[in-house]
Image (tube, rainbow, N blue to C red):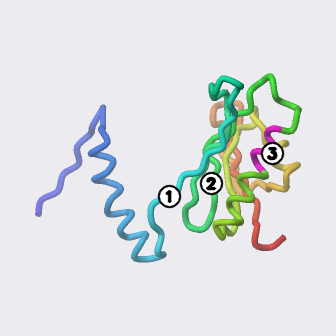
Amino acid sequence: MSLRIETKAAPDDADFQAIVAPLRAYNHAQAGMTLAEKVAFVVNDESGVTHGGLHARVFGQWLFIELLVVPESARGEGMGTKLMHMAEATAREKGCVGVWLDTFSFQAPDFYQRLGYSVFGELKDYPPGHSRYFMQKRLDIQ
């Protein structure tokens, strides 16, 4: 078999699936890891319009928080803490070892630290002049 590398300026979902399929198969064979299970808690107004929330996925016995958005009008009222506690409770129910997330220096690293999260990695100058922090909270040792 002759292989070559091709640059794709506009890759589509089929390209992604072709690349990720053998990786998923390998991960499953090595660690029993399957597809991620998605979890979300949405913040709606009285008419059902979504204004924020928390979107996460469970994979490898960890819950990864992909997105947390608290509507500006509700900041400082405990809604972010409530969403995080709901995510942590879900992680415990699903037998997760812990929760991890990433956040920028201009977002909410102090908020997460107040909730017991610790930094396990920092990417400096991403974007330039700022940092991206990778944070975790173990649930199995508390």
Q: Is residue 14 left or right of residue 97?
A: left
Measured as percent of width and height from the top left, residue 5 is found at: 23, 48
> Bounds of the magenta span?
79-84
Q: Main secondary structure of the magenta part?
A: helix
Say which label, 3 or 2, has the lower sequence index. Answer: 2
Q: Is residue 1 above or below residue 38?
A: below
**Amino acid found under the numbered disc labelled 1:** Ala
Look at 84% across and 42% down and name the residue there.
110
Measured as percent of width and height from the top left, residue 108 is found at: 78, 38
**Amino acid found under the numbered disc labelled 3:** Lys
Look at 58% across and 59% down and name the residue there.
58
- Report helix, strand or loop for mark 2: strand
121 in the magenta segment: no
Look at 76% across and 67% down and name the residue there.
139
User: Which residue position holds label 1?
Assistant: 36
**Amino acid found under the numbered disc labelled 2:** Phe
Measured as percent of width and height from the top left, residue 18 is found at: 28, 53
Say which label, 1 or 2, has the lower sequence index. Answer: 1
Say which label, 1 or 3, has the lower sequence index. Answer: 1
